Amino acid sequence: MSSNFRRFDIFWLLLTIIALAVSGLYSVAVSMMRIPSIYKIFHLPDFFKISLVIHVTLSINIFFMLFGIYHMQVFLKRSSMTQFLKYCAGLSLSLIIISGFIPNSSAIIINYIPLIDNAFFIIGIALFFLVFLLFSILTLIKLLKEKWLLVKTDLHHHFLFSISTISIISFICLILSYFINMKYIIDIKNFPLEEFSWGIGHILQFVFVEIGFLSLLKNLSVFNKFFELEKNPKWINKFLILKIGIVSIAPFFYFNSSYYKLFTIHMRYGIAIFILPILFLFIQSLKQKIKEQYFNYAIIGFILYFFVNLYGGILGFAIRGVNVVIPAHYHGSLIAITILLMSFFYGAVKNIGKKIDIMIFDLRMRKLIFFQLIGYCLGNMMHITGLMIMGGYGALRKTPGDIPMNIFFGKNIFIVGSLLSISCGILFICIAIISIKKICRNYTQHFNSH
């Protein structure tokens, strides 16, 4: 089994499953504690907030970055450095999971990178971000030294370059933010953690979009051979320069006193430039395949991504004040990327199965995957619709038990959607574990016979 983990980098895929599984467990507490009747019985505001922090950290920051690391690891291939970083990533994930059970801890609810004030969480999240940064630096160095021509002619390398470069820029924003806020170090109680993490949090959203699209590209063109993107498309160089240019201006925001607002405007309009041209490319390339192969996990994942992302974007225009319409908006955008990564996972394990001559998914399992992706999408659409309705009645974000009792429809669609999305998340975990076990069980037998 260990040789299998080394040969196919299953370790990284396994970490993604652990992160999502633990995140799902904590999301149950988050969803249920929003309901007044349940909150009155348990009345655990600290547990709600700690669960919210770990759920957000594992399901967004860690889950997305792990797929980014997976792509970079495949590109870099195995070395003593990447092996060391692998163990560091496993350790950091363990520390974050354990942090939720440390007594006398409290949550620091801030946007993008929420925290728990115990050493396990702080060391865990800092170590994981460092691992991601080092992978980005190693990837960028190899691209510049050995693969620069491919960056300019091949969309796979284009995305790798974009992910690694923008990741490094996000950490530059973190360093600049530290120096801008150094005056608060003396009075640590008033340190503006929200603003401190604002820049890196915003720029990481661009990284997550790129990770999602690289996963989609590999799923459609490498794992399933649905299309071959032409080499040296004329727009690749110009598009890459445009994307890096858009993100490279972000560190300069810190030289303006209104940098907090500048980051918001930057993401609101900049992210559309990242998404729309690539969406157009995929739609153009997949016109015929969508009609023929809509049952395939890669195609259905792309279709669901399109509609959930569109719905989340529309909800952004409904934001009025500070309420649960805000998480409804960004849940739509982030769940859309999660769907791409789930469908990529199916493609990755199926591709490994091909290499060792075993069928990972039979017809029954393919139908189950189809149901899982649609159910997960539908559940989350209901979940964010419920949040939107409750937000319209003033339900506050990050607040347990704050659902007005007279919002019968909004409350119930929220509960049903939460249960459906959690159930389909569990189904994804089960399918993933069965797939990995199947690979590990057949690996030794296959190579012994050859």
Image (spheres, rainbow, N blue to C red):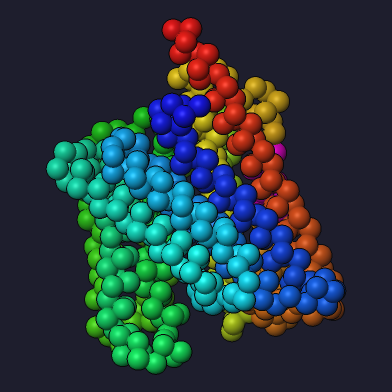
Q: Position of residue 135 (x, y in %)?
A: 31, 49
User: Going by the image, does 118 lie left or right of 8?
Assistant: right
Q: Is residue 272 visible?
A: no
Examine the image and state in which quarter residue 178 appears.
bottom left
The residue depicted at 35 percent of the width and 48 percent of the height is 85
The residue depicted at 29 percent of the width and 53 percent of the height is 134
Considering the image in quadrants, where does the C terminus appear?
top left
User: Going by the image, does 98 lie left or right of 82?
Assistant: right
User: Going by the image, does 136 lie left or right of 96?
Assistant: left
Q: Nearer the viewer, residue 445 or 234?
A: 445
Looking at the image, is 260 positioned above or below residue 433?
A: below
Q: Nearer the viewer, residue 174 or 245?
A: 174
Q: Is residue 433 visible?
A: yes
Residue at the outermost top position: 449
The residue depicted at 79 percent of the width and 58 percent of the height is 416
Looking at the image, is 448 positioned above or below residue 145?
A: above
Q: Which residues are magenta?
A: 370-379
**376 part of magenta stretch:** yes
Q: Position of residue 364 (x, y in %)?
A: 71, 25
User: Going by the image, does 237 lie left or right of 351?
Assistant: left
Looking at the image, is 52 positioned above or below residue 359?
A: below
Q: Position of residue 198 (x, y in %)?
A: 41, 75
Residue at the outermost left position: 145
The residue depicted at 59 percent of the width and 29 percent of the height is 437
Q: Position of residue 256 (x, y in %)?
A: 27, 85
